Amino acid sequence: MGSLMGHDADIAEQFEKHLNSPKQTWLLGAGVSYPANIPLMYPLTDRVMELARNDLFAADADAIRVLDFVIGDCSETSHIEHHLTHLGDLISIAERSRTGGVDIGGARVSREKLEEVHRGLIEQIASTVRWGYQAARKNGQGEVVTEAQIGSQSKAIVDISGHQKFVEAVFGTSRAGLDFVRAPVEFFTTNYDTLLEDALALAGIEFQDGFIGGGVAFWNVQNYANQTGTRAVVSKLHGSIDWYRPHSGKTNLLRVRHGDTYPGPSGSVMIYPQATKYLNTQRDPFAEIFQRFRRRLSQGNDHVLLVCGYSFGDDHINAEIEIAMSSSRNQLTVIAFNDEPNGELPPTLKDWQTKAWSQRLFVASPKGIYQGSIGPVFSVDDGNRDWWTFDGASTLLASGLPKDIQEAMA
């Protein structure tokens, strides 16, 4: 039993060492913003489609036909990003068509109408994310037990406190000794909201995000270069509610304040995936941001990727992580903070636990700590550690491993 506990303690010590690595990259998904009253992807999809049908396009038969077709043509597990991708493909077909449109439901729909629907859906996403939304909760009988909460410009329900706690945990006084040795912490997020950037600014943490300017800023890839004082770099893999793409002219992608009268209505919020592909990286940052993610993962030894709020549902991102972990020239370690819905880890993590490099994969789940295929170790009686949540991960960073694990390691 003693040797078994010693082995468990060794896993915990390695986990703690990597948790405090001087070279950290974070991948943050929708789960970190859910406690802030920003919906996960499927509730967001339901809300956006409800707004599109009943409000934005209620009197537009062509737009409704497009929505019905896209939803019906995508798989049942599709969400709003899949719908936007499908819509983007239809726009590309319409652009190549000699008639300038596509046949949907027995009628011809113009490229302009497809673009209008695409733009409208993105605007509804931005509005929902900006002010916050919580879907109604139902019991097993389908009865509503908690009414939906809908944020608005006059009464936003978004709560930044969880992100502030996280930023304080990553850069706070309890981890101040790391500042002397580590490079800027890099954050990659699939979220559209601005909570991470706002929390960094509120904490006085200097960061780069690829934009130059103040309230209105323009995209310039050169601005990713670390400057004196830079402590963080933020890269938004799927765009942002404050990114704005002008429809004409040579203006670069902009970051704007909501509600300003300029730069004017002739543009749209830029949320990935976009219907029109731009070859000019100055206008379309997505290829550059993803390339940065790829390069970052391949940077040498003693480098840790910490993953929180991400359900491993993006095959593109998963593939890049797996390639980096498989490289013989790379010694990347992954720490994933993940739930085990239905008592199991996500399929991608279960697959990775079987790989030759799985000893560099740690998972903190409600059941305990995994190292590769070993574990969970340090499970608790109720089988429900909370360190896999955004709040729990922040507490772990700020306070260290729980007391029972520290005693076993002593």
Image (cartoon, rainbow, N blue to C red):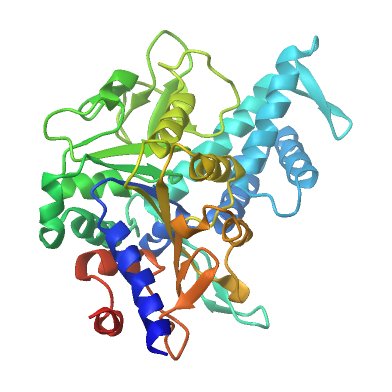
What residue is rendered at 71% in x and 41% in y?
67
Residue 183 in the image, given as x and y percentages of width and height: 21, 39
Work out whether residue 277 or residue 166 is closer to the camera in this orientation and state it: 166
Q: To which quarter of the image does residue 37 belong?
A: bottom left
* Residue 275, visible in the rendered structure: yes
Query: In percent of the image, x 45 and y 52: which residue is there?
Result: 29
Is there any visible trace of residue 159 in the rendered image?
Answer: no
Q: In the shown orientation, is residue 266 left or right of residue 274?
A: left
Q: Is residue 197 left or right of residue 116?
A: left
Is residue 32 shown left or right of residue 110?
A: left
**Image vertical order of residue 10 relative to residue 198, above or below:** below
User: Which residue occupies 60% across, 32% down?
Assistant: 118
Vertical relation: 206 (above or below) 304 = above
For the C terminus, the quadrant is bottom left
- In the rendered view, tell whether residue 383 sits above or below residue 371: below
Where residue 169 sits in the image (x, y, percent)?
21, 60
Up the image or down, 270 lies above or below 130; here it is: above
Quarter holding residue 8:
bottom left
Q: Which quarter of the rendering shows the N terminus?
A: bottom left
Residue 360 image position (x, y, % from top left)? 45, 55
Of residues 318 and 328, which is closer to you in this image? 328
| Number of numbered labels in the structure image | 0
- Residue 318 spot, x, y in % from top left: 56, 46
Q: Nearer the viewer, residue 172 or 352?
A: 352
Which residue occupies the foreground of this view, 124 or 282? 282
Which residue ends up furthest to the right in the rendered image?
A: 106
Which residue is drawn at the image coordinates 20% and 28% (left, top)? 214
